[in-house]
Image: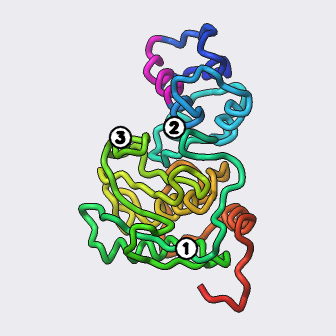
């Protein structure tokens, strides 16, 4: 595959002229610009690209200032991922965000087509347990509409301004505790969800999205479950990274040894 040079010029306000890549690279070039606007700007139509946003993009994908868009970077940018953008939009606030209590309820509103409800319930329980095992948080599943964390599966546009895109794109998104939709967790119902390595492992994605619902932003550490792109890990041996534990404990503190998950 012919490579193209992704210079930081593409991150300048769109009123400035952009360098023209080779004709064969136009599709990839446009994809990168669209990706940046979609996941690193508050609004796609905004032309203001701050130095902070540029740095976030470069650091998150370990891209240096030369900006070489090679096959490895092409693969990274096409990897299925979480739909939560870096920074803020109309529904998400930046800065420290956390619940002001330590007992949280969650409700599973609906289920993916190819998984039994009992399997999904077990998976979500295991996902919330990853966070309660290292903090004083406790979680309780309820049926009431006023649950703190509300989990559901939707296709395409579903009323929150973040439409899904069909299979193999954005897998899910969630809202921080201090947002307009606190604790809301959505998964793309068009994905092939599973408890294994077939399709997309629901436990891994749920652990990530629940992390957002507890107040965590994306991490630049590729070993973190809060890294924005999806990578499969064996759920049976999975554990939170040091980065995950440090950041969630910064919000809620450590679990005392006398406490049981």
Residue named by callout 1: 104
Instruction: Identify the mark nearer the N-term, 2 or 1.
Output: 2
Residue 180 on the magenta span: no
Camera-near label (3 vs 1) is 1
Q: Name, please, the residue furthest toward the bottom.
A: 258
Name the foreground residue: 139 vs 241: 139
Q: Residues within 10 Å of mark 1 (few under 14, many from 20)?
A: some
Instruction: Identify the mark nearer the N-term, 3 or 2.
Output: 2
Q: Is residue 36 left or right of residue 1?
A: right
Residue under the point 41% across and 63% down: 151
**Alpha-carbon distance for marks 2 and 1?**
34 Å
- Counting from the top left corner in percent of width and height, residue 19 is at 60, 10
- Counting from the top left corner in percent of width and height, residue 9 is at 66, 17
Q: Main secondary structure of the magenta part?
A: helix
**Alpha-carbon distance for marks 3 and 1?**
30 Å
Residue under the point 40% across and 43% down: 169
Camera-near label (3 vs 2) is 3
Secondary structure state at the residue bearing disc 3: loop
- Counting from the top left corner in percent of width and height, residue 257 is at 72, 88
Q: Is residue 14 above or below residue 215?
A: above
Asked if the residue at tag 2 contacts the one at tag 3, i.e. Cβ–Cβ closer than 8 Å, the answer is no
Q: Which mark is residue 153?
A: none
Name the foreground residue: 140 vs 171: 140
Quarter holding the C terminus? Answer: bottom right
Camera-near label (2 vs 1) is 1
**Alpha-carbon distance for marks 3 and 2?**
15 Å
Q: Which residues are magenta?
A: 23-34
Residue named by callout 3: 165
Residue under the point 61% across and 10% down: 15
């Amino acid at each position: 595959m012919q490579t193209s040079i992704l210079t930081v010029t593409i991150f300048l306000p769109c009123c400035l002229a952009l360098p023209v890549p080779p004709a064969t690279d136009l599709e990839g070039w446009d994809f990168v610009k669209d990706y940046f606007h979609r996941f690193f700007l508050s609004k796609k139509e905004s032309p203001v690209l701050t130095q902070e946003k540029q740095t976030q993009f470069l650091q998150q994908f370990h891209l240096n200032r030369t900006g070489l868009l090679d096959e490895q970077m092409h693969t990274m940018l096409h990897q299925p991922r979480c739909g939560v953008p870096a920074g803020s939009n109309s529904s998400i606030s930046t800065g420290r965000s956390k619940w002001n209590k330590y007992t949280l309820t969650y409700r599973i509103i609906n289920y993916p087509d190819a998984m039994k409800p009992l399997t999904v319930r077990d998976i979500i329980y295991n996902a919330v347990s990853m966070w309660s095992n290292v903090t004083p948080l406790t979680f309780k599943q309820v049926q009431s509409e006023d649950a703190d964390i509300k989990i559901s599966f939707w296709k395409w546009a579903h009323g929150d301004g973040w439409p899904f895109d069909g299979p193999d794109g954005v897998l899910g998104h969630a809202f921080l505790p201090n947002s307009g939709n606190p604790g809301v967790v959505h998964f793309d119902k068009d994905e092939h969800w599973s408890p294994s390595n077939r399709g997309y492992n629901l436990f891994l994605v749920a652990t990530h999205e629940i992390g957002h619902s507890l107040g965590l932003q994306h991490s630049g550490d590729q070993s973190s479950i809060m890294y924005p792109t999806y990578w499969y890990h064996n759920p049976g041996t999975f554990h939170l990274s040091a980065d995950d534990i440090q950041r969630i404990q910064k919000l809620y503190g450590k679990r005392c040894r006398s406490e049981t998950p």
